[in-house]
Amino acid sequence: MKKIIFSCLVEIENGESDSRITDVKELRSYDNLTYEDELFSDYFSDGGDSTLVDARVSGGTLSLKFDPTSNKLFAIVEYDLQRDLTEQELEILVDYTGGQLSDGIGGNFGEELEQDRDWAMYTSLEYDYDNLNIEFVN
């Protein structure tokens, strides 16, 4: 099955001190965490546009990966594809994924981590969704 994988830098902002977490050991502790409560494809037809449903895009799992080369944390969103997407479908998927990272599922994942990790109030994940990397896997 074909896949499309989006990735972008994610930083953890500490709301108490208004600073970003840069400690490598702490960032590494987020490696391979996956948000399993929702898939990005769960909301494809919200708003009445069925383009992505019609294109048979599915999945959309959000996970975090630590890159030991750069010592940075990345958000990964992976979708399954039944076929190649048209340019219009790809554009819709890119915009949709960025939107979900900014104020949808991405925020929900941050809230879950806040509870699971006993974070201070207002700690958040900050996604660089304007700079999504895209990889196609056959």
Image: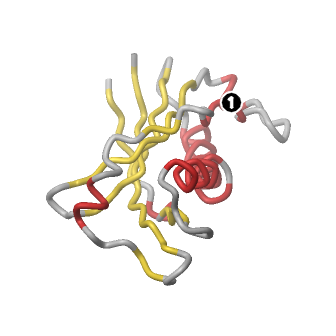
Write down the residue under mark 1.
42
Q: Which residue is nearer to you in this view: 71 or 120? A: 120
Image coords of residue 105 (percent x, y):
63, 46
Q: Which residue is drawn at 49% across and 83% down?
A: 17
Q: Say which element carries label 1.
A: helix
Q: Which residue is nearer to you in this view: 99 or 49? A: 99
Q: In this view, does 22 lie above or below 2?
A: below
Residue 15 placement, left or right of 45: left
Q: Is residue 73 above or below residue 45?
A: below
Residue furthest to the front in view is 118
Q: Which residue is nearer to you in this view: 81 or 42? A: 42
Image coords of residue 108 (percent x, y):
63, 49
> Mark 1, residues whose alpha carbon is within 10 Å: few (<14), some, or many (≥20)?
few
Image coords of residue 77 (percent x, y):
46, 41
Residue furthest to the left in view is 69
Image coords of residue 120 (percent x, y):
55, 68
Residue 48, image quadrant: top right
Residue 41 placement, left or right of 127: right
Q: Quadrant of the C terminus?
A: top left
Q: Is residue 57 above or below residue 25?
A: above
Q: What residue type is labelled 1?
A: Asp
Q: Quadrant of the N terminus?
A: top left
